[in-house]
Amino acid sequence: MKRPAASFSILWLALCALGGCAEQPPPAGRKAVGPGIRMGEPAAASTGLDLVLTSGGTPSREILEVKGCGLALIDFDSDGDLDVFAPNGATLAAPEEGPGCRMFENRGELKFVDATVRLGLGLRRWSFGVAVGDYDGDGHDDLFIACYGPNVLLRNRAGGGFEDVSEAAGIADGGWGTGCAFADTDGDGDLDLYVCNYLSFDPGKPPSRAAFKKTEVLGGPLGLDAQHDILYENLGDGAFRDASVASGVRSVEAAYALNVAIVDLNGDSRQDIFVGNDSMENYLFSNRGGGRFREVGVESGVSANSDGASQATMGIAVGDVDGNGFPDLFTTNFSGDTNTLHLNLDGAFFADRTRGWGLGRVSMTSLGWACDFCDLDQDGDEDLVVFNGHVFPQATAESMDSPYLQRPQLFDRGADSCSLVDPLAVAAAWLARAHRDRTAVRGDLDGDGDLDLVVGGLNEPLRLLRNDAGKSYHWLIVELRDERPGSMNRRGLGSLIDVRRGETVQRRWLRGGGPFQSANSHRAHFGLGEGGEPVRLRVTWPDGNVQDCGEVRLDELYTVRRAGD
């Protein structure tokens, strides 16, 4: 059941008094990052990513139309480069028969071709979230799509096509699925599946109009029935079973779940589950081992912000912001509220340090969706990118303090604060243009060592943002291959990868879940700045096994193989 926040808001006020809650103004002047962000936006016609994502109509009339669909980066043919998958949506007129998903095969040099028909991808559902994972352990990544209506599991047939195995796998839940993630939640070596469910919506019986800042707007989610999330246990034979009750995930009140991050938050080699909920407290399921979880959101400090207020969590980013070795959580929220930085103090307790890090006031007039920690300038620390866009077409700066179309935000991370990057300072046209953005995925799409972005908006064309930072600074990209006989987690999802240079350590977690309803590449990227000296690479696999790779060369894709212990 939902619990009152008053009991812990006093604690957070006390923490604030110790420092971290006073808003730090951004530094004066225009802030440049690293050697300068140089991200171009080639035309869709030149890249082949010629898709307008569908999500109902424009303007949005019902809550079903405002979330958009996710994106995924997947090397479906195992040729070493990253392909782009868009599950796509539908319309209120035909919610079960949309224009269909698209798979864009990477042919190199940022050229993509539509391989949808050749691969037998006939998915036309109203799709929202997408997860990538090799659930059957055959070495080829598969796709799960969370839908409005029955979900879909697409088995990768060795890169030659995809087979719909939803019914046989037992995952065809008929709710409204949103965020989703593969992860080994019970520690048995294979990939389980977590599916966020949102609410019950009947297009034939839409909810009554609501009011926001004295303006009539579309109704929901409050007043509509929330749905329980589902945790599916992988049985190892191609099928899953609903383990929501047995695991403890079903022990909480049904919530309006939008996104999920599955990551080892306390270093005990068990994957914890953080769920971002809309207009309700967030959930944190602490992994107790053996497939059992206990919800600890309130006692750990991530259920709400420092004021004790539930938020509308959409995007989730994971990274070690303060360098203490534990993964922190950043979430995006509704306009009129701040995004939230939950610093992981010791693996068990989190503190809201949003204002202290300069991330509060600058987010008040934005409605945030996808967010990610990523070193776009390759200077050695992960910056923060946030994509925005309102849900109410009526929104203006005058009526709702926030326009309908909104610009992305890029924050340069310093030692103890983040600075909003002025697009004029870095000649970044992509930062200056306003959109109805919903999601974004990042990965090295052109093989030059830096992180490119693919952005998806609401009824907008896909945008590819080409990064040229790799021409200035050094880098390292790491992928994992668990080649032990019988391995069912060949990409090492759930691993911790760290790179050391002297006393400096960078950490990346191969988490389950993505920025918003999406799946990033399962490769870890490290920007390494100007220094050309080697770095030391170490991998902590999901079962706690540590593999020290020693010194590795810079500026290459490095594959860590686990053949035995």
Image (cartoon, grey):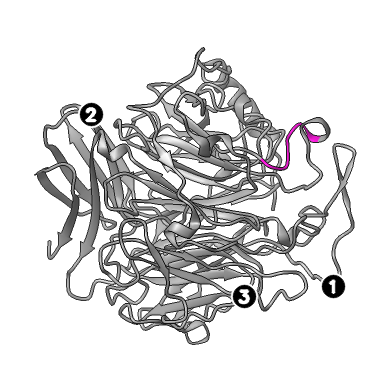
Image quadrant in which you'd find residue 76: bottom left
Q: Nearer the viewer, residue 48 or 213?
A: 48
Residue 504 has which mark?
Answer: 2
Image quadrant in which you'd find residue 536: top left
Q: Earlier in the sequence, mark 1 or mark 2?
A: 1
Element marked by disc 1: loop
Q: Nearer the viewer, residue 42 or 220?
A: 42
Looking at the rendered image, the disc whose residue lies closer to the viewer, 3 or 2, is 3
The residue identified by callout 1 is 204
Q: Earlier in the sequence, mark 3 or mark 1?
A: 3
Q: Quadrant of the C terminus?
A: bottom left
Q: Are marks 1 and 2 in contact (CB under 8 Å)?
A: no
Q: Is residue 14 above or below residue 403?
A: above
Gap between marks 3 and 1 measured at Cα:
18 Å
Q: Is residue 323 magenta?
A: no
Counting labels gives 3
Look at 52% across and 46% down and name the residue there: 316
Element marked by disc 3: loop
Horizontal and vertical percent position of residue 166: 51, 82
Q: Earlier in the sequence, mark 3 or mark 2?
A: 3
The residue identified by callout 3 is 125
Look at 39% across and 23% down and name the residue there: 414
| Residues shaded magenta | 400-405
Residue most toward the top?
A: 28
